[in-house]
Image (spheres, rainbow, N blue to C red):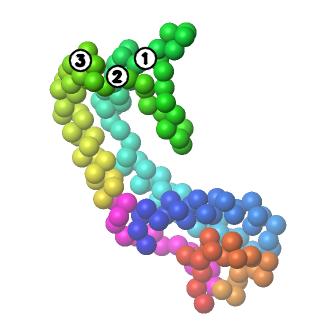
Amino acid sequence: MKNNELFEIAQRISNILPSLDKIKGAKFHYALLKNIDLLQKEITLIQTKSKPSDKFTEYEKLRIALCEQHANKDDQGLPKKRDMGNGQFEFDIDTEAESWKTAIEKLKGENAEIVAERDEQIKQYNDLLEVDSDIKFHLIKLEDIPNDVNGEQMQALRFWIYS
């Protein structure tokens, strides 16, 4: 399994975890808790590889301030934003305006090395997501899976079951 699949497994487990609470089986719950810990540690380790540097964080603050400055304003003088979904937004900016083009190109030029480092970091992170994971889950014998486990739960647990 690839590292990127670990995030999907974690999401599936997170979705079914409350429903597993009432299911009995000491061996089952021990394996479940052990695997959740392994999964969380591995995901945290992977996510640390995508954390931006302090220099890039400072660049982002400058870029956002520039966006706020050049964004079209609402009735209260605040920068207009467009909702992009998933909690994301973009500023409503006339990207063809010369003042915007000049300002953003200047900022990018002054921070070209920092932006290039971040681009390389993102590339390396994306490559890491495609690498086979070396995580060794605690496998659960099929006979140790309680009969109360339903299809959705079994689907989420399938990576941890052997017969």
In the rendered view of the protein, which quadrant contains the N terminus? bottom left
Q: Which segment is the magenta one?
A: 128-141
CB-based contact (under 8 Å), mark 1 and mark 2: yes
Going by the image, does 133 lie left or right of 13? left
Q: Amino acid at mark 1?
A: Asn
Q: Quadrant of residue 90?
A: top left
Q: Find numbered disc 2 in the image and state the secondary structure of the residue it sits on.
A: loop
State the image coordinates of residue 83 (x, y, percent, origin top left): 52, 34
Crowding at dot 1, Cα within 10 Å, few <14 / some 14-19 / many 20+, comes out as some
Residue at image mark 1: 72
Residue 144 visible in the shown view: yes
CB-based contact (under 8 Å), mark 3 and mark 2: no
Specify the principal SS of the magenta part: loop
Q: Residue at x 24, y 35 (%)?
A: 115
Whether 23 is among the magenta residues is no
State the image coordinates of residue 77 (x, y, percent, origin top left): 50, 9
Residue at image mark 3: 98
Residue at image mark 2: 94
Crowding at dot 3, Cα within 10 Å, few <14 / some 14-19 / many 20+, comes out as few
Q: Amino acid at mark 3?
A: Glu
Crowding at dot 2, Cα within 10 Å, few <14 / some 14-19 / many 20+, comes out as few
Q: Residue at x 37, y 70 (%)?
A: 132
Q: Earlier in the sequence, mark 1 or mark 2?
A: 1
Q: Amino acid at mark 2?
A: Asp
